[in-house]
Image (spheres, grey):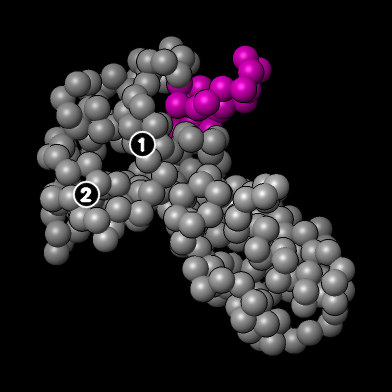
Amino acid sequence: MRCFIGFSYDGSKYFGYQKQIDKRTVQGVMEEALTKINGGDFVSLVASGRTDAGVHAIHQRAHFDFNKDIPLNKLKRAINSLIPDDIYVSTITKVDSTFHARYSAKAKEYIYIINMGPYNPIEKDYVYQYNKKLDIPEMERALKYVEGTHDFKSFVKSSGDNDDCVRTIIQTSLVRDIKNVNMITLSIFGTGFKRYMVRNIVGTLIEIGEGKRKSEDIINILNIKDRTKAGSCVPACGLYLKDVYY
């Protein structure tokens, strides 16, 4: 049977989602647990996409094929009992064998959290400790230029001139925490993302918030398709895969 799961994880202690030799990864520890439950027959966990070292997931999605016929509620409990407590499987359902967690996905939402207030060592692995004020209205205006279908080559770590970096950003937002106005959350909801794309966009937005660039500079950066013209890549700690939509 093919199972489709929703799960969350604290990425601060992992070298990303994707399995790597001699490194602790989310996929690695989850496949180890699934294989044990499957009687030693290897189980491959196919996620909606990989997240980099230090990146978190609020609701990641993945599928796997399982030999044993186990009630889903028992399978969920078994998985959670064997994986570390910084990963948690929240949902599990049976799906058709043609379903694919990556290729069937229609959209994803990422959020990035920034602290403009005093440094907080407790939150350092979960919130980017920028610790300076930013021009929020100018950043909000810049975000709107990101929306739509664009070639995001300027915001992507290129692996070749033929990379397809055209993506559609459906909606963006910037929200200030009501209880703590120094905490801001940037949300980017789109049909797909390239590696480092969100972190590079946020890095550029921060430079706009610092007054080093203007909001409309985003238009030129998109058009020029040159990674060196955009802002720096912000730390992974503030980035979360919020959800995947099918």
Magenta highlight on residue 176: no
How far is the residue under mark 1 from the one under mark 2? 13 Å
Q: Residue at x 46, y 49 (%)?
A: 54
Front residue (pair 70, 99): 70
Q: Which residue is mark 1?
A: 234
The kind of secondary structure element at disc 1 is: loop
For badge 2, the amino acid type reads Asn
The answer to whether residue 202 is left or right of residue 178 is right
What residue range appears in magenta?
A: 147-167
Up the image or down, 182 lies above or below 75; here it is above
The answer to whether residue 43 is left or right of residue 193 is right
Residue 115 marker: 2
Up the image or down, 189 lies above or below 33; here it is above
Image x and y of residue 124, in percent: 30, 53
Q: Residue at x 56, y 22 (%)?
A: 158
Image x and y of residue 104, in percent: 68, 52
Magenta highlight on residue 148: yes
The kind of secondary structure element at disc 2 is: strand
